[in-house]
Image (cartoon, grey):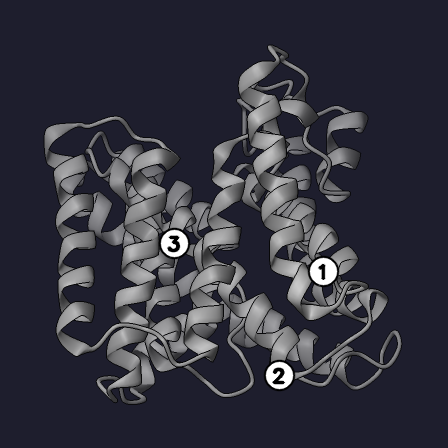
Amino acid sequence: MISAPTTTIYGIQYLRAVAALGVVVFHAAERTGHHFAIGAAGVDVFFVISGFIMWVISERRPVSPLAFLRDRIQRIAPIYWLATVVMVIGGLVGLFPNLVLSNAHVLSSLLFIPMRSPSSDEIWPVLVQGWTLNYEMFFYAVFALTLLLPRSRRLPAIAGCFSALVAIGFAVDSDNALFVTYTRPIILEFVAGMIVAELWLRGRVPGAMSGLMLVAGAFSGFAAVAVLRLPFDEFILGPLAVMLVLGTLALEAQGWFRPSRLPMMLGDASYSIYLWHTFAISVVVKACGMMGIGLLTSALLAVIAGTALGVFAYLLIEKPLATRLRSGFFSRPVQHTA
């Protein structure tokens, strides 16, 4: 979902692809009556990767807070706004009968402000999967502020801020959407990613054998959660995501990963896949139901269609738009791969 650093770290790129595909399979399974809730753990992996990449980028290319925010907004917002507009138009013409629209909710969605949905009373934007972007934008805002500090104080500042928010969340009972969102322990996954990045930059990641054990342990843990129906929360998924990212980086440091066209493409397209896949899944599942196609086949076709739509959206929308923005469409952006 988040862009790779200037010097491509192939293991991270492949993890982005795996995380995006996990979310696609999760939604396809959900729509066809199957169980693959563990696929939603791709979000936890994305958050750890996001913390990792932002820390690495800030180290490799020092930037001002405003330039950092401008770069992040240009990277994240336009395509999300487009997907949200498509969702709104679909709701207005009756394509999404369960979608209830309100001006306040649409505006808050576009501005990345958490608000309860009039459709479900959940703290979701119009495009449901956009809930993760509310966290991403909050993290970016806090990260930008810490760029005013000496480097040695930035990580402790963010860790202290996020830990305090989580502690307040445990101490205070409130159903306010902003409070509930930004006091969830899931925000600590960004901090964990930054810590992993610092280990990477210092060359202090584990060796290959330890890396293999971490990756195997992470996937075994995810499988146990899925099979045993263990509690599905950030207290379990967060540490597993950290193990997976750290283990992958340990293997990366030993040269285990090489560029391969398909996984590299899926990694590049992971953000578009994440945003657009549900549109294709909805169409395919409905069409399969009308044609009497079995649920398992429907799920498989939905995964393929959701992934394909995301790749096409990346090639036809996200990539050209990013190129135009980098060329100075708004103002001079930060010069790094995004």
User: What crowding class fits label 3: few (fewer than 14 Cα within 10 Å), some (14-19), or many (20 or more)?
Assistant: many
Residue at the image point whose x is 63% and y is 12% from the top: 174
Tally the marks: 3
Nearest to N terminus: mark 3 or mark 2: 3
> Which residue matches tag 2?
60
Which quadrant holds the C terminus?
Answer: bottom right
Q: Amino acid at mark 2?
A: Arg
Residue at the image point whose x is 77% and y is 63% from the top: 149
Residue at the image point whose x is 26% and y is 40% from the top: 38
> Which residue matches tag 1?
78
In the rendered structure, are the residues bearing label 3 and label 2 in contact, judged by CB atoms less than 8 Å apart? no
Residue at the image point whose x is 44% and y is 45% from the top: 278
* Residue at the right extreme, as displayed: 331
Horizontal placement of 54 versus 144: left or right?
left
Give x and y (percent) for residue 19. Answer: 35, 57
Q: Secondary structure at mark 1?
A: helix
Q: Nearer the viewer, mark 1 or mark 2?
A: 2
